[in-house]
Image (cartoon, rainbow, N blue to C red):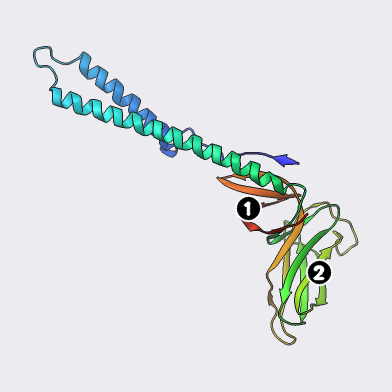
Amino acid sequence: MTIAATTAPSTTANTNNPLGSLTANMNDFLQLLMTQLKNQDPTTPMDSTQFTGQLVQFASVEQQVNTNTGIQTLIQLAQSNNVLQSSSLIGKTVTATSSQISVQGGTGSIQFNTPAAEPVTITVTDSTGATLAQTSLTSTAGANAWTWDGKDSTGQQRPDGAYTVTVLGGPQGTTPAAIPFTVSGLATGVTTSNNTEQVLIGQLTLPVSAIQSVGS
């Protein structure tokens, strides 16, 4: 079971960190203002209108920093809350759209629909694109399901993990076309990355928005 909140790697460069850049600018402005006060000509003091305007600018920058800090805190709280809500998926069978099948406990399942009975070819490939298994069948009109036993063409059992699947079909005598499909598996964890909540189905990671249904 995995519940994690992760964020994308951040950079220390202020140019890529708006809040850090804003804070640095505020500090620079404050230092310049103090230097200006220390070195002004006593016989010709700084114009009060200018001084007031600069103080207003300083206060405005400070307010922007505080506002951005507050917004970041709210975002982090929202992300944590979303992860907690998504954690209710753990231990349940979920069906989601994906180009990969999740093999758990040696098997993985997909579902697809065809308007009529037609020849269908299902191919499973690994991360290098090499074909592991391929099967041809005749679908039934409407909903169809197919389960891979995790064995490649040589009969070797492949380890649990995520494998790419293609489903091609069409009426007899026509050029096969891709058939949309969904995958099913047991949700084993939730996480967040790049402000997106994701569900783990074994070693397959999908955005929560990809989930089509949740079973028991």
* Three-letter residue code for mark 1: Pro
Q: Number of callouts in the render?
A: 2
Q: Which residue is mark 1?
A: 207
Could you say where residue 151 lies in the image, as x and y percent from the top left? 87, 60
* Alpha-carbon span between mark 2 and mark 1: 28 Å
Q: For the residue labelled by badge 2, is the local secondary structure a helix, a strand or a loop?
A: strand
Q: Residue at position x 71%, y 49% from top?
A: 89
The residue furthest top is: 42
Q: Quadrant of the N terminus?
A: top right
The residue furthest bottom is: 173
**For this rendering, which residue is in front, 82 or 41?**
82
Q: Is 105 above or below relative to 23?
A: below
Is residue 70 in view? Answer: yes
Q: Residue at position x 26%, y 30% from top?
A: 57
Could you say where residue 42 lies in the image, as x and y percent from the top left? 12, 12
Q: Which residue is mark 2?
A: 134
